Amino acid sequence: MKRYLLLSVLVITVFFLFITGCGIKDHQFQGEREAGEAIAPLAESSPEGLSVFKPTDPAQLKVHFLDVGQADAILIQLPDQQTMLIDAGNNDDGSAVVSYLQQRGINKINYLVGTHPHEDHICGLDEVINTLEIGQVYLPKVIHNTKTFEDVFLALRSKGLKVNPAHAGVTLLKQDNLKVNLLSPAGTEYKEINDWSVVIRVQYGDKAFLLTGDAEIQAEEEMLAAGLELQANILKVGHHGSRSSTTSAFLAAVAPEYAVISVGRDNDYGHPHAETLARLAQMGVQVYRTDVEGTLVFTTDGQKMSIERQGSKLKTDQAEGQSPVAGNEKVAGESTGSGSNGVLIGNKRSKIFHQSTCSSLPVEKNRVYYATREEALSDGLAPCINCKP
Ligand SMILES: [Zn+2]
Ligand SMILES: [Zn+2]
């Protein structure tokens, strides 16, 4: 009996996070999606859509940055067919994430990571846990002092899943060609909950991804001071492009070719901040945003890299009859721009600028005009990935 009690106490105290609660639907994101609207269904890549890889080639790593509005959800399909899911968006994103996975024939998540106890990262997890088979679960060890994230915790418990504490130094995978390491959190105390974010570096062959959750300056400085290998070809920009993340020093150490900002259109925080976009532009980093591009999938065989758009669940501010995303579309290594009459057209809302011939121009009221690329960049706008102004 005594032993049973002790065990119960242990089980209950094994893991704790603190958040403001998953059950409450966050009204500030309501405008971004229509009721019942889900992530656009996945079609299999057409041979010409993804010409450098065969869709069935098993020796690929695929990293999906799901468009979940002002939130994060990242799916990784490992070359050995195992899967990793990092965050699952807000509470009402859970079912969209689940159907995205099921449409790909994914019924098991081998590694499930909740980066930190903010609702835009972990509140969709309970649906994933309840619906799919789950292998190992990793969460940062944040001491709770308010409400637990009940739905997630209950889902884990009802499945008898144990939580592995996520911290710097943990190796999730170490194979010849594939390494998945946790680089943060290293500390035991952070002022900002965001700095508890689990930071993950995935290296496959010559290509690396750095996925930083909402990690801010303190966590970035710790990673720099620890002399960790930070270099990555693709950086998932911290905290939805907030100015409190992605310092110049951190960016210089990562030295990415591409950056992905997981962000909701017209969010209340003004993310991504102009300062972050300017720092990325200064480093010559090609920026992709889920609010502009929808879900983005990076595929690599360890040497070559391909990027596809998988559609957006968000409404766009495109002119009528125009669609920024038409099914699967290869967006890297391909130029669709066809000259310009010299005027560049920026979008005040998305902070992207285009050639005047681009098919994704903003509606009139959101336009701002620039004479030069430098002018647009210095105004904090990022170039469109289609027309490459
Ligand atoms: Zn967040
Ligand atoms: Zn956060």
Image (tube, rainbow, N blue to C red):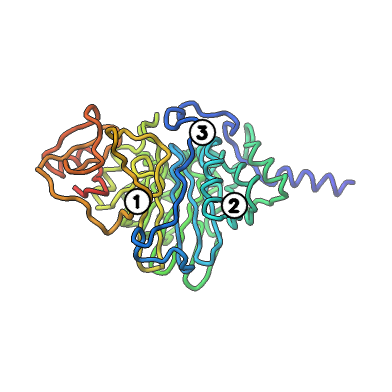
Would residue 80 be found to the left or right of residue 359 on screen?
Answer: right
**Residue 363 at what x, y percent from top left?**
25, 31
Q: Which residue is mark 2?
A: 138
Q: CA distance from mark 3 to mark 2?
A: 30 Å
Tell me which numbered mark, 3 or 1, is placed earlier along the sequence. Answer: 3
- Please give the name of the residue rendered at 56% of the width and 38% of the height, measured from the top-left corner: 123
Q: Which residue is mark 3?
A: 36
Tell me which numbered mark, 1 or 2, is placed earlier along the sequence. Answer: 2
Where on the picture, by quarter, is residue 111? bottom right
Classify mark 1: residues with Cα within 10 Å, few (<14), some (14-19) or many (20+): many
Would residue 178 be found to the left or right of residue 275 on screen?
Answer: right
**Residue 160 at what x, y percent from top left?**
73, 50
Q: In this rendering, which labeled residue sits more in front, label 3 or label 1?
A: 3
Q: Secondary structure at mark 1?
A: strand
Answer whether labels 3 and 1 touch (C-beta < 8 Å). no
Question: Type of residue at label 1?
Answer: Ala
Q: In this rendering, which labeled residue sits more in front, label 3 or label 2?
A: 3
Q: Which residue is mark 1?
A: 259
Question: Type of residue at label 3?
Answer: Gly
- Please give the name of the residue rendered at 28% of the width and 51% of the height, measured from the top-left corner: 286
Classify mark 3: residues with Cα within 10 Å, few (<14), some (14-19) or many (20+): few
Question: Type of residue at label 2?
Answer: Tyr
Q: CA distance from mark 3 to mark 1?
A: 30 Å
